Amino acid sequence: MNPQTRDKLMGVSVATLSTALYKRGLRNQVIQDVRPVKRKGKNMVGPAFTLRYMPAREDRNTLAVFQNPDHPQRKAIEVCPVGSVLVMDSRKDARAASSGDILITRLMVRGGAGVVTDGGFRDSMVIGELDIPTYHSRPSSPTNLTLHEAIDLDVPIGCGDVAVFPGDVVVGDHKSLGKIWKIAVIGN
């Protein structure tokens, strides 16, 4: 991402972005029903790196799979590019945990620009204290780890009823609780 573009988006309000997108005919750019876990005092800006969840099957999604370093949820944290926003399609279901504080801490240390899920986070109180912008639907139950299975990385997803493609620019306005904006990448 161009550093000058990133710097400009760090200071742009969601309202301004929505108007600019609307004037260009882009009307479905708002990831619905997500809000910051805790305000960070700065916008979240970065290209999207995506993770898709699907309904879990008990024979495939036991607790033992989380020990595998190649598990898609763990792998997403390890391969998400520095400066990118991890965007998770959690099927708009906050009952199951999209992630927890250990993985979000690891993403923060690796240089992630933020995290968005249309599901929930476990350990949300701890995640809120981390120095990384995080947006979710609501806190999830810490025991519901196996309702969804992480299945695909860096593929087109639907998050909060919005199509998000890898590399799309994602901007979360720190001033507007409840709004996340996905900006379409427009070629020259």
Image (tube, grey):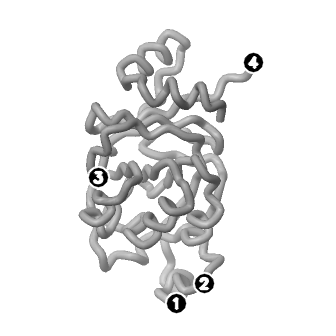
Q: Which of 5 and 87 is in front in this view?
A: 5
Say which quadrant the N terminus sits in. top right
Give the residue number, with chain letter if any, for mark 3: 37
x and y, in percent, of residue 174 in the image: 32, 36
As shown in the figure, which amino acid type bears the numbered disc 4? Asn
First in sequence: mark 1 or mark 4?
A: 1
- The answer to the question of whether label 2 and label 1 lie on touching residues, with beta carbons closer than 8 A, is yes
Which residue sits at x=52%, y=90%? 64
Q: How crowded is mark 4: few (under 14 residues within 10 Å), some or many (20 or more)?
A: few
Which residue sits at x=60%, y=37%? 168
Q: Residues within 10 Å of mark 2 (few under 14, many from 20)?
A: few
As shown in the figure, which amino acid type bears the numbered disc 2? Asn
Secondary structure type for disc 1: helix
Which numbered dot is residue 68? Answer: 2
Which numbered dot is residue 64? Answer: 1
Marks 3 and 1 sit apart, C-alpha to C-alpha, by 29 Å
- The answer to the question of whether label 1 and label 4 lie on touching residues, with beta carbons closer than 8 A, is no
Give the residue number, with chain letter if any, for mark 4: 188
